[in-house]
Amino acid sequence: MLTISRMKAILTPTLSAFTFQLPKTTHLALLTSKSFPCNPNPTTTLLPLYPTTLSSTCSIHLIQSRDVHMEPATLPPEFPGEIHVIVGPMFAGKTTTLLRRIQSESSNGRSVAIIKSNKDTRYGLDSIVTHDGAKLPCLALPDLSSFRQKFGLDAYDKLDVIGIDEAQFFEDLYDFCREAADNDGKTVIVAGLDGDYLRRSFGSVLDIIPLADSVTKLTSRCELCGKRAIFTLRKTEEAQTELIGGADVYMPVCRKHYVSGQVVMEAARTVLESQNVKCVSYA
Ligand SMILES: Nc1ncnc2c1ncn2[C@@H]1O[C@H](COP(=O)(O)OP(=O)(O)O)[C@@H](O)[C@H]1O
Ligand SMILES: Cc1cn([C@H]2C[C@H](O)[C@@H](COP(=O)(O)O)O2)c(=O)[nH]c1=O
Ligand SMILES: [Zn+2]
C-alpha cells in the first residue's frame, strides 16, 4: 500500500515527461508477486527496500534505472484546461449560451472553434444556428476524434477554446473532452441534451459531468401552460432515439404536460405499431 509521503514523492514531477528514471543508488525496488512470492499484494508495487526486515525466503530484484522501461508519461500542461457543460431540453437556449460564451472568449483575444455533429444538416454544415436564427461558423464532424486532423495539427495547438454543440450525438465525447482539457490545456464548452424525448440519458453527455468544472442546466417555457419547461416532448409517432427536427417535431414542456402528453403519444405509437404489425402479418 502507498503511504501519503510516497504518493507525494511519486506525484512531485522531479521526473522528465517522457522517462521514468530511478537513481542507481535508489532504495526502491520494483517488486512483483513473482519476484517476491511472500508479497501479499499480487499487483506490481513500488516498495521501499529494507533488506533486514525481509524474510530469507523472499527473493528480491533491485531494478536499476537503465533496466526500467515504462511507457512515456504525459505530464499535465502548464495551464490546464477547463470543461463547462450546458444541458437542458430543446429550446432552452443551450446553443445561444454556447454562442455567447464563444463570442466572449473570442473578444477576450482567445482563439476559438466550434464543432457540431454532421447528423444535423438542418441549417447546412458550416454554421451552428439557434432557434432564433443567430449563427457562427463551425466544423460539422461525424466524431470528435477527427477534429485535430480536420482542423490542422498546428491550428489545434494554437487553439484556446473549443465549443461543442449537439454533444449528445458524439460517442467519443468523454475521451475528447478529457484529453483536450487534461493534456492539451483547452477550455471546452459543451452544449447538449441531457435527456432524450423519453427522458433517458442521451449519448455521453451525462458521462462528462464528473470531468466538468461547471454544469449549467437551462430551462425553457412549457408550450402548453407557460410554466418552466424541463423536458422535450416528441409530437410525432417516430420511436427511434435520434430524430433530427425542430419545433415541427418537438416542444418544451413542464413535468405535468410531459406526463399527460407522453401518455397520449405512447398510446398513439402503440396503436400505430399494432397496425404496422397487422400490415406485416397480412403481407
Ligand atoms: N417552443 C418554442 N418553439 C420555437 N422556438 C422557441 C420555443 N421556445 C423558445 N424558443 C426560442 O428558441 C430560443 C433558444 O434557441 P436555442 O439557443 O437554439 O435553444 P437550444 O439550443 O436549447 O435548443 C429561445 O430564445 C426562443 O426564442
Ligand atoms: C429530444 C430529442 C431530440 N433529438 C434531436 C432533435 C434536434 O435535432 C436535436 C436537439 O437540438 P437542440 O439544439 O437541443 O434544439 O436533437 C433527438 O434526436 N432525439 C430526441 O429524443
Ligand atoms: Zn405545462
Image: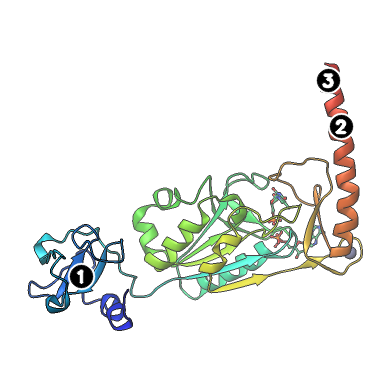
Query: The residue tagged with tag 3: helix, strand or loop?
Result: helix
Cβ atoms at labels 3 and 1 below 8 Å apart: no
Cβ atoms at labels 1 and 2 below 8 Å apart: no
* Mark 1 Cα shell of 10 Å, populated few (<14), some (14-19), many (≥20): few
List x then y, in percent, for residue 142: 53, 44
> Which mark, residue 16?
1
Residue 39 drawn above or below residue 241: below
Query: What residue would you read off at disc 3?
Result: 281
List x then y, in percent, for residue 123: 66, 48
Residue 168 vs residue 144: left or right? right
Residue placed most toward the observer, 1 or 23: 1
Q: Residue at x 64, y 46 (%)?
A: 120
**Alpha carbon of mark 1 to alpha carbon of mark 2: how far?**
66 Å
Residue 147 vs residue 38: left or right? right
Quadrant of the image occupied by residue 216: bottom right
> Of all residues shown, which one is farthest toward the left?
25
Mark 2 / mark 3, whichever is N-terminal: 2
Residue placed most toward the observer, 105 or 5: 5
- The type of colouring in the image is rainbow
Quick check: which quadrant has ligand 1? bottom right
> Which mark, residue 151?
none
> Of all residues shown, which one is farthest toward the bottom?
5
Residue placed most toward the observer, 83 or 119: 83
Q: Where does the N terminus fall, quadrant-wise?
A: bottom left
Query: The residue tagged with tag 2: helix, strand or loop?
Result: helix
Q: How many marks?
A: 3
Residue placed most toward the observer, 282 or 34: 34
Residue 43 vs residue 101: left or right? left
Query: What residue would you read off at disc 2?
Result: 274
List x then y, in percent, for residue 257: 89, 60
Q: Residue at x 74, y 64 (%)?
A: 92
